[in-house]
Image (spheres, helix red, strand yellow):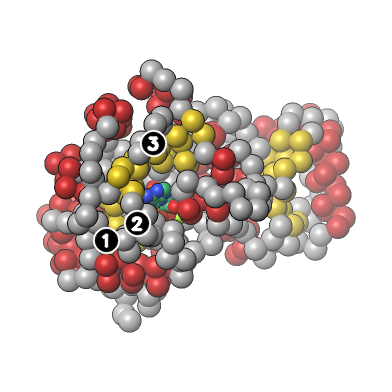
C-alpha cells in the first residue's frame, strides 16, 4: 500500500489552519469516508484514524498496528452533539467533565449504543469517547462527518508517536495517509475515566489530572489496579490496553525513585561497569547534584536530559521521543530518574513504570 504524506506546512509554522492546509485535510477526510486509514496529530499523541462505525475500518486499524483485537479503540468526535448517538446514557458526571475539559485530553467510558460495532470496542458493551482540541484533528473529524476511531498511531508495543516522523517510521506502507501537523503538544495519551460504573475510576492518567477530576466532580476518584503495580495472574485491568507491555524500549530499564544522589550515582557507576551501551534518562537537577558531590558521570554512559524536575509538562512532551531514542542509540541498559507523581507527574511516572516493566529501585 502507498502511504500519502500530507504536510500541513502553514499549520506547522503558524499554528493556524490555512485554506491550503484544509484542502489537504479534505483529501484525508475523503479517505476516512471511503473506509481507509489516516494517521493524524492530536494534542496528546498522533492517532491512527478510521471510521468508528464501520467494522472493516476498525479491523484494518488492528491489522495496521499489529494490535490484539480485544483492545478497544477510542472514538473521537468534534462536537458534543456527536456524543448522544454513540452512548446509551450520559451520566451527570460526564456532563460536568465534558463541559470543563472538552475539547481536550480526556477520554470517558460510556455504555455503548448499538450503532457502535463490537469491532471498535474490542467486544465490550462500553465505548471510550474523546473530543480532541487539536485544530487538525477537529477539522479532520468535522470534514469526514463521522466519529473517528483512533488508537495511538504506533505499531503495537512501541512508544506512542509524538511526531509525524514517528508515524512514518512505524506505519509507512500500512496506512493510506499520514498528516504531518508538527509535534504533539502534551506528549502523553489522554486521561481515561470510566463513568459506566457506580463511581468514577481513573483507568489511565494524563494531562487532565486526578486532582482536576476530583475538584470538578467534588468526589474521590478510584484508581484501577493496573495503575498501582504489575497485575497478578488472572487480574484484569479495566482498560484492556493497560495489560500490555507498552512503551517498552528494547533494553531493560530500571526506574530509580528517591532523592539519595549518592545511591543514584552508585547505580550509575555499576551500570557503567556492567553494560556495553549504558544510557541514563534524567533531569538537569540530577546532573547538578552529582557535580555538587564533586563527581561526574562516567564517559561511556550516554545521558539523555529530560529537562527540569520543575517542568513535568516538558518531561511529558519529550518522554516518548526519548524512549524511542534509546532504541535508535542501541542502548543495552537504561536507568531512568523518577519524578514527583503530583499532577501530570502521575502520567509521566505511569508511562515510565510501564516502560521499565515495573522494575523500580527505591533509594
Ligand atoms: O490520547 C489518546 O487517547 C490517543 C489519541 C490518539 O487520542 N489515543 C490512544 O488510544 O491513546 P490507544 O488505543 O492507544 O489507547 C486507548 C486505551 C487502551 O488502553 C484501551 O484499552 C482503553 O483506552 N479503552 C478503550 N476503550 C475502552 C473501554 N470501552 N473500556 C475500557 N478501556 C477502554
Ligand atoms: Mg496506544
Q: Residue furthest bottom?
A: 1
Q: Which residue is mark 3?
A: 197
Q: Nearer the viewer, mark 3 or mark 1?
A: 3
Taking the image as shown, residue 257 lies to the left or right of residue 50, namely right
Q: CA distance from mark 2 to mark 1?
A: 7 Å
Residue count near mark 1 (Cα–Cα under 10 Å), binned few <14, some 14–19, many ≥20: many
Taking the image as shown, residue 240 lies to the left or right of residue 88, namely right
Residue count near mark 2 (Cα–Cα under 10 Å), binned few <14, some 14–19, many ≥20: many
Which residue does the image show at 31% across and 80% down from the upper left?
2
Residue at mark 2: C-beta within 8 A of ligand 1:
yes
Which residue does the image show at 74% across and 29% down from the upper left?
259
Determine whether label 2 and label 1 are within 8 Å by CB. yes
In the image, 358 versus 207, the foreground residue is 358
Q: Quadrant of the N terminus?
A: bottom left
Residue 89, by quadrant, is top left
In primary-sequence order, the first of circles 3 and 1 is: 1
In primary-sequence order, the first of circles 3 and 2 is: 2
Q: What's the mark number on residue 220?
A: none
Amino acid at each position: 500500500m502507498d502511504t500519502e504524506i500530507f504536510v500541513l506546512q502553514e499549520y506547522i509554522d503558524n499554528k493556524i489552519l490555512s485554506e491550503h492546509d484544509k484542502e489537504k485535510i479534505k483529501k484525508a477526510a475523503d479517505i476516512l469516508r471511503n473506509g481507509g486509514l489516516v494517521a493524524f496529530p492530536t494534542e496528546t499523541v498522533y492517532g491512527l484514524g478510521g471510521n468508528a462505525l464501520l467494522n472493516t475500518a476498525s479491523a484494518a486499524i488492528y491489522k495496521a498496528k499489529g494490535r490484539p483485537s480485544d483492545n478497544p479503540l477510542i472514538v473521537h468526535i468534534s462536537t458534543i452533539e456527536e456524543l448522544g448517538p454513540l452512548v446509551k446514557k450520559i451520566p451527570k458526571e460526564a456532563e460536568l467533565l465534558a463541559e470543563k475539559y472538552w475539547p481536550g485530553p480526556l477520554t470517558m467510558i460510556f455504555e455503548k449504543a448499538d450503532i457502535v460495532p463490537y469491532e471498535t470496542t474490542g467486544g465490550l458493551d462500553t465505548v471510550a469517547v474523546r473530543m480532541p482540541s487539536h485544530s487538525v484533528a477537529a477539522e479532520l473529524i468535522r470534514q469526514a462527518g463521522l466519529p473517528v476511531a483512533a488508537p495511538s498511531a504506533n505499531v503495537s508495543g512501541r512508544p506512542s508517536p509524538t511526531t509525524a516522523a514517528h508515524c512514518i517510521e512505524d506505519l509507512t506502507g500500512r496506512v493510506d495517509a499520514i498528516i504531518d501537523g508538527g509535534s504533539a503538544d502534551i506528549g502523553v495519551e489522554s486521561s481515561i475515566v470510566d463513568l459506566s460504573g457506580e463511581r468514577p475510576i481513573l483507568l489511565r492518567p494524563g494531562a487532565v489530572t486526578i486532582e482536576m477530576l476530583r475538584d470538578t466532580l467534588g468526589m474521590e476518584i478510584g484508581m484501577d489496579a493496573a495503575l498501582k503495580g504489575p497485575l497478578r495472574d488472572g487480574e484484569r485491568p479495566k482498560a484492556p490496553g493497560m495489560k500490555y507491555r507498552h512503551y517498552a524500549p528494547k533494553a531493560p530499564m530500571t526506574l530509580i525513585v528517591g532523592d539519595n544522589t549518592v545511591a543514584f550515582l552508585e547505580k550509575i557507576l555499576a551500570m557503567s561497569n556492567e553494560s556495553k551501551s549504558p544510557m541514563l534518562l534524567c533531569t538537569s537537577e540530577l546532573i547538578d547534584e552529582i557535580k555538587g558531590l564533586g563527581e561526574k558521570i562516567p564517559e561511556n554512559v550516554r545521558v539523555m536530559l529530560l529537562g527540569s524536575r520543575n517542568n513535568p509538562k516538558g518531561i511529558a512532551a519529550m518522554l516518548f521521543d526519548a524512549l524511542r531514542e534509546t532504541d535508535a542509540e542501541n542502548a543495552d541498559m537504561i536507568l531512568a530518574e523518577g519524578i514527583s507523581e503530583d499532577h501530570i507527574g502521575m502520567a509521566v511516572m505511569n508511562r515510565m513504570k510501564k516502560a521499565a516493566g515495573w522494575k523500580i529501585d527505591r533509594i
